Image (cartoon, rainbow, N blue to C red):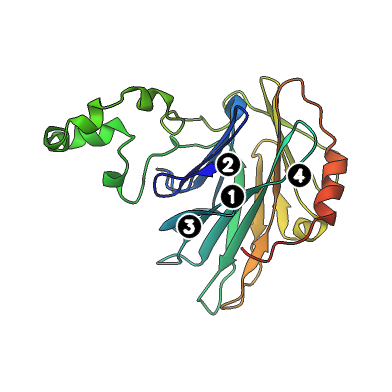
């Protein structure tokens, strides 16, 4: 089930499996961390800024984040929902939605392998992130005002999955997939992670090379007020667990389209 205790952060746990999501990382991207040092980031295409998160919530055991347009070219919404499945793999449906108030805009978002910056380090308001010890060093008066916050339970810092950086592509192997609808497969220490797309979303995606390990979504003209959305499935397999990606792509194609973003 999902839990959320800080701005932009969500953690899914089930029978020892843990997925961490942080939409408030220092890099300005939304970072997802799977077991086996596998990770994905979702951020802006090229060098333009990515909308900052201002709200997160859990609804019907789905994790949502909201990113208003602000000074960016578009607003962004993210949702993640676990798909029930009889096999041993973990399947999550993500929903990436964009909307703009501009009259002439061609926004795009990019999903890339690796998380880049340390997960859980705030880029918008560092004072809200108590998990990063650098914040306490920057302002010692905060520690003096209430030292119990730092000394109450040191084990929490050691166990906090958001504390430790996941280097982008450090030791991760990008695997080619001949299956239509499987544009990206990552492997590290026998842990595997695949991105699956339905027939409709393939048209909205441009896959990079195995060297860049990224997927570009949208990028066409976006009419003011119109919501564009894709719903990639993320499939994780632990060491020794087999998967049938072709069968899962068929399952995705036959699944109903969620009504909400």
CA gap between label 1 and label 4 equals 27 Å
Labels 2, 3: front one: 2
- Above or below residue 89? Residue 198 is below
Q: Which mark is residue 48?
A: 3
46, 83: nearer the viewer:
83
Q: Residue at x 36, y 27 (%)?
A: 157
* C-alpha separation, residue under disc 4 versus residue under disc 3: 24 Å
Residue 240, how many percent across, how many down? 76, 20
Foreground mark, 3 or 1, reads 1
The mark found on residue 2 in the picture is none
The 10 Å Cα crowd at callout 1, few under 14, some 14 to 19, many 20 or more, is: some
Callout 4 touching callout 3 (CB < 8 Å): no
User: Tags 2 and 4 in contact by the CB under 8 Å rule?
Assistant: no
* In this picture, residue 13 sits left or right of residue 153: right
Q: In this figure, which residue is indicated by the disc labeled 1?
A: 61
At 48% from the left edge and 48% from the top edge, which residue is drawn? 29
Using a 10 Å C-alpha cutoff, classify the residue at mark 2 as few (fewer than 14 neighbours), some (14 to 19) or many (20 or more). some
Residue 108 falls in image quadrant = bottom right
Q: Earlier in the sequence, mark 1 or mark 2?
A: 2
Within the image, what quadrant is residue 71 found in?
bottom left
**Disc 1 element:** loop
Mark 1 touches mark 2? (CB < 8 Å): yes
């Amino acid at each position: 089930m999902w839990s959320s205790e800080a701005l932009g952060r969500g953690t899914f746990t089930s029978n020892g499996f843990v997925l961490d999501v942080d939409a408030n990382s220092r890099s300005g991207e939304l970072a997802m961390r799977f077991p086996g040092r596998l990770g994905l980031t979702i951020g802006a295409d090229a060098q333009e800024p990515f909308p900052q998160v201002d709200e997160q919530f859990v609804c019907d055991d789905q994790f949502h984040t909201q990113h208003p347009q602000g000074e960016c070219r578009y607003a962004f919404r993210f949702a993640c929902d676990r798909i029930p499945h009889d096999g041993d793999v973990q399947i999550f449906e993500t929903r990436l939605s964009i909307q703009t108030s501009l009259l002439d805009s061609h926004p795009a978002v990019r999903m890339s392998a690796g998380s880049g910056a340390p997960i859980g380090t705030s880029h918008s308001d560092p004072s809200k992130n108590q998990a990063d010890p650098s914040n306490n060093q920057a302002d010692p008066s905060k520690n003096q005002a209430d030292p119990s916050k730092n000394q109450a339970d040191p084990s929490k810092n050691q166990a906090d999955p958001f504390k430790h950086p996941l280097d982008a592509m450090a030791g991760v192997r990008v695997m080619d997939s001949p299956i239509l609808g499987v544009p990206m497969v990552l492997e590290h220490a026998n842990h595997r992670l695949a991105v699956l797309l339905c027939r409709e979303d393939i048209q909205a995606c441009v896959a990079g090379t195995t060297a860049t390990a990224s997927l570009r979504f949208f990028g066409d003209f976006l009419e003011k007020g119109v919501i564009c959305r894709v719903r990639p499935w993320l499939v994780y397999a632990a060491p020794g667990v087999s998967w049938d990606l072709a069968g899962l792509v068929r399952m995705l194609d036959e699944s109903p389209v969620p009504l909400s973003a």
